[in-house]
Amino acid sequence: MKFSLLGAPEVRSDAGVVDVGHARQLSVLAVLLVDVNQVVGVGKLLARVWGDAPPRQAKAALYSYVSRLRAALDVPIVRRSGGYVLEADPASIDLHRFRSLVALGRPDEALSLVRGEPFAGLHGAWFDSLREALAGEMTAAELDHTDARLASGENASLVAELTARTSERPLDERLAGQLMRALIGADRRADALAYYSRLSDRLADELGLDPGPALRDLHASLRPQWNPRQLPAAPPDFAGMTAELAALDLDGPIVTITGPAGAGKTRLALHWAHRHAAGYPDGQLFVHLGDSDPADVVREFITALGTDNIPPEPHAQTALYRTLLADRQMLIVLDNAANTTQVVPLLPGTPRCRVVVTSRERLPGLVTAHGARPIVL
């Protein structure tokens, strides 16, 4: 037996639709299905079905409805502890199946269970409140499903759909971000910028707020970008280190070159970087770290990447830095690092970028936690 609540309530058996009576009797069944396998007290049943002031005859009517439901259904409704419990497999009830699928990260399957307005035709404050809560759950599942579709490349096909949704929920920032991502993926960056501008104005006018960090980061990634070329001059008369150069040629997003002072770490890094600069068309970043504060370097790199609207919070600055690098293929040379802690905030979040770190220290934290490949001089 299958029970449907995400639409007009309905019960089906192998023989077809089961007649479970009029709306009030169906309301009793719906309450028991929502709390399946749990005792629902008589007082709670009365309040949910008849409201806070049920008529005097409501309790007698409830007993009659339960008796009729027992006769119509092949699942038990048991009297226990001052109430009733309907015993059934939660997977046979679409509401519980919906929530289970959402929890499993399968929002598309969850949404396919929705046939219309939940509990359609059933009235009362409790059902209205439950419908409102379920509307929020369905919206969240819809947003999760859209994220998955965007991740799979359904950009152009989502633009019209998301445009319609944003017209219905114009201040939903997560939905707004999805529309911007779809526009970007459909090569409509100018439209994404224009939409952000309109949304920003509306948030300010209606709520007195600026867009949140996620939208600001997305907007920052759309601004005109520079391709910095920060490498110092290539060292003259470089010779030797054939094995080390070959090691640098191997794949891997992070490599460390370590050794004592005067071993040639920077010369090796710069020689290799100039030889391979053409392979990083979005530019090269370079910094001599020494005793620099990595937060200062992050801000310098953000500016070098063409953005001057830098958030004040350090974690937001690092997030913006990685956002700006997300779709780029860049070479980043971090020279003379003091320790791993100094380097980590400067690592991009994408393997498309290559990071070369030189240091007098071995930097084992970069090797073990970040997969850096070590070259020791």
Image: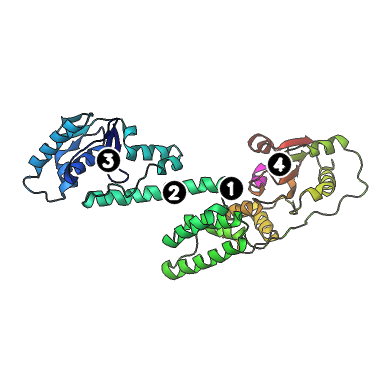
Query: From the viewer's perspective, is 22 left or right of 345?
Result: left
Disc 4 and disc 3: Cα gap in Å?
A: 56 Å
Disc 4 and disc 2: Cα gap in Å?
A: 35 Å
Q: Name the residue carrying label 2.
A: 142
Give the residue type that dot 3 points to.
Answer: Glu
Sequence-first tag of 1 and 3: 3
How many numbered circles does the render carry?
A: 4
Dot in front, 4 or 3: 3
Disc 1 and disc 3: Cα gap in Å?
A: 37 Å
Asked if marks 1 and 3 touch (Cβ < 8 Å), the reply is: no
The label on residue 10 is: 3
Classify mark 2: helix, strand or loop.
Answer: helix
- Judge by depth and name the residue closer to the eye, 375 or 263: 375
Q: Principal SS element in the magenta part?
A: helix
Q: Residue at x 41, y 50 (%)?
A: 139
- In the rendered image, residue 277, in percent from the top left (x then y), is placed at 80, 50
Disc 1 and disc 2: Cα gap in Å?
A: 17 Å
Quadrant where the N terminus sits is top left
Give the residue type that dot 4 points to.
Answer: Pro
- In the rendered image, residue 141, in percent from the top left (x then y), is placed at 43, 46
The label on residue 253 is: 4
The label on residue 153 is: 1
Give the residue type that dot 1 points to.
Answer: Gly
- Judge by depth and name the residue closer to the eye, 311 or 289: 311
Up the image or down, 223 lies above or below 28; here it is below
Dot in front, 4 or 2: 2
Q: Residue at x 60, y 54 (%)?
A: 185
Give the residue type that dot 2 points to.
Answer: Glu
